[in-house]
Image: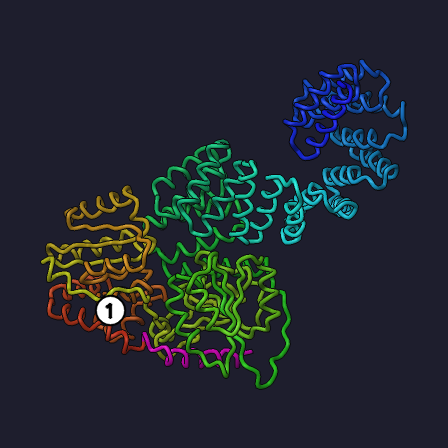
Amino acid sequence: MNERCAGAWNLISRMAALNGDLETAGDFASLACELEPVNAGFARGLGEVFLQRKDIGQAEAQARRALELEPESPEGLVLLGRVLAEKGERGNAVEAFERALRLRKDYAEAISHYAMALQKFGRGKEAISQIRKSCALEPESVEHQTNLATILEQEKRYVDALAAYGKAARMNPDIGYVWFRQGKLLNGLKRYAEAVPVLEKAVALPGRLGEFHYELGIALHMGKRFPEALEQYGQALAAGYNSAALQCNRGVIFKELRRGGDSIMAFHTAVKMDPSNLSYLNNLGAAALEIGLNSEALDCFEEAVRQNPKIATAQNNIGNLLKDRARGMDALPHYRKSMELDPSSSDTQSNYLLCHMYLSEMDPKAVFEEHRKWGLEKAKKTPPAFKFKPRSPGSKLRVGFLSGDLCHHPVAHFIEPLFREYDKERFEFVAYGDQRKSDEFSERFAKQVDLWRETCSLTDEALAKKIHEDRVDILFELSGHTAYNRMGVLALKPAPLQASYLGYPGTTGLPAIDFRITDELVDPVGMTEKFHTERLIRLSRCAWCYEPDAEAPEVGTLPFQRNGHIAFGCFNNMAKLNPALFDMWAEILIKVPDSHLRLKARTLTDDRVKNELKDFFTAKGIAAERLDFFGHTRKIHEHLNHYHEVDIALDSFPYHGTTTTCEAMWMGCPVVTRAGGAHVSRVGVSLLSAVGLEELIGQNREDYIGKAAALAGDIDRLVELRAGMRNRLKSSLLMNAPDFAREFEVALLQMAEAR
């Protein structure tokens, strides 16, 4: 009776091991050995379980016990050889395998394990020779074929390894591990699109493991299929698989999807799991920066750089942090260091160029030269890749728009009037929505244009190929060097004509971009052409058409009438602010006694930043109680409600506001701006002229200060402006969408004639 029971327990143990339940397998194998202690096969079975569980000491004990019971057993010698190989006892392991093969020279399983040991000990060529012998002896063995693939992969013969994995999968398509190994190799080769269907087969089979889901998550993640990747990472966690790398990957996706709190939690977990990996600390800082926790972010970055000054991403992130604290000049050395450490980082290059646009200390010619230098270098590394066929006579002009901001973003408020009003009888619009997360704006745009494509998951090369296949005649980029730009796509020149518009207040510097849409006030003839590599196409009216947010609250009464003092305000992000601008604002506050300054920006969520700024103004003689600083608000109506406490909006300089200027006026606040000599500092000139408020344009520092102070002293004028500002905008060029669309179409035809 005991003998029969022992055999049954041994069989159950083997079945449990096949299903990956090594705990149960060990329990039943131990029971079989207790019932029949002189059975060498049962001892080997228990040793096999211990080996799979990486309990090497117990595995060796069972292997030697089995050999004591059957000294000339090839199976026992193979098990001992595998154990000794795992321990790194090279000579003893090889001796055990060779002794087994002397006893049974055609023992395919022994040859297969011998080959794996040889590869482990650095004898790759011999390993391949041996494993091919086992495959020849048992050509239907998926295990031998998989071992062949594994050895080929470890020997960096990747093409041969993929072929071997493929053959193993065809031999038995129901083994998830084979699909997993093939997909993992494809991921390692960065062939993520090919890896996805392979790994999907792996996770669809019974007995799927968390690591399978993790690897599929990587393939989807690298293909920018972020929600699907998150789902797979979640499945991996649910199956008991966790690692610092997995948590880091989750953090990266959460950051891409602008889920700041989730991103911080994931990166924090990664740091706790592996404190020695400074990239996790750097990522934690980047996530904190994303939601305005600048001081916490700075602590992370500086600690990472302290431990390793050669972390390029940390240097770049310190640059971003300082830029967003109105310290652009301090940011530049960090960007330069980052580019020195990682010359291939297009993100850092764009951050470096964008930072120049904010600097009051930087001459426009120097800013242009930096952009031009970058563009020439980019053109060298990324030559145009396509040829074009002539347009069919009489065909519609096909116009493409590429942007990562075709969602609830400032760009949306200026592109929607064009998408809604363009002449569909003469033009075809194709929108390449490259946003990380689509929303109701994206859905609306998709219905307004002739063709909508979601492109976030495509590489630069794949996206350029798609645009070329779409036969786009003119391709617009709407980002410049701001976040999520696709300059790499434009460099490949997928359309015969390419243009820049809307998202960047200056030249891109890229030779592959032919034109830039602007107007005669923001880029006066003879003034700014020298600061552009593109040919300027000037509209005869304002180059912007504003679409207010549907959730905007009604205009309130003039705050002065409630508060008894004038409140100046600026809601531009802090990157647009600088010490020279603060000096001008301090003079305005001194000229207007008891007036307040109300600033609102994401960076001002951070108390340390608030205190630094307050210290600056109090040193200029401005009492702290006259300063009102506010951070980020999640809802647009909450943000716009802050204008109920602003009498006069002050534009930033040299980088003017665009959306903020329009929002301020829509909420009844007149905006005082200062005109400069480059596009970046003339946007306000165009916007204010479009609504008939040219008198609020200061021509220099003193004029800007004087106009702000004079307006503050004219309460009747402020009351009048407040009451009539929204109607003023509605009846102005700034919100005349049909007129804007016709002007834009004239510009399109002007560009098409140049082809």
Residue linked to disc 1: 697
Was residue 3 drawn as part of the magenta stretch in this picture? no
Say which of 65 and 603 sits in front. Answer: 65
Residue for point 73% across, 16% down: 35
Say which of 438 and 729 sits in front. Answer: 438
In the figure, is residue 57 to the left or right of 277? right
Where is residue 751 drawn, in percent x and y?
A: 50, 78
15 lies above or below 633: above
In the figure, is residue 258 to the left or right of 93? left
Residue for point 80% across, 24% down: 78
Was residue 747 drawn as part of the magenta stretch in this picture? yes
Q: Residue furthest bottom?
A: 394
Describe the colour scheme in one phrase: rainbow
Where is residue 142 drawn, in percent x and y?
A: 78, 40
- The C terminus sits in image quarter: bottom right
Q: Determine which quarter of the picture holds residue 143.
A: top right
Say which of 80 and 588 sits in front. Answer: 80
Where is residue 514 drawn, in percent x and y?
A: 51, 71
Give the residues drawn in magenta, as a range: 734-755
Does the magenta stretch mainly form a helix, a strand or a loop? helix
512 lies above or below 352: below
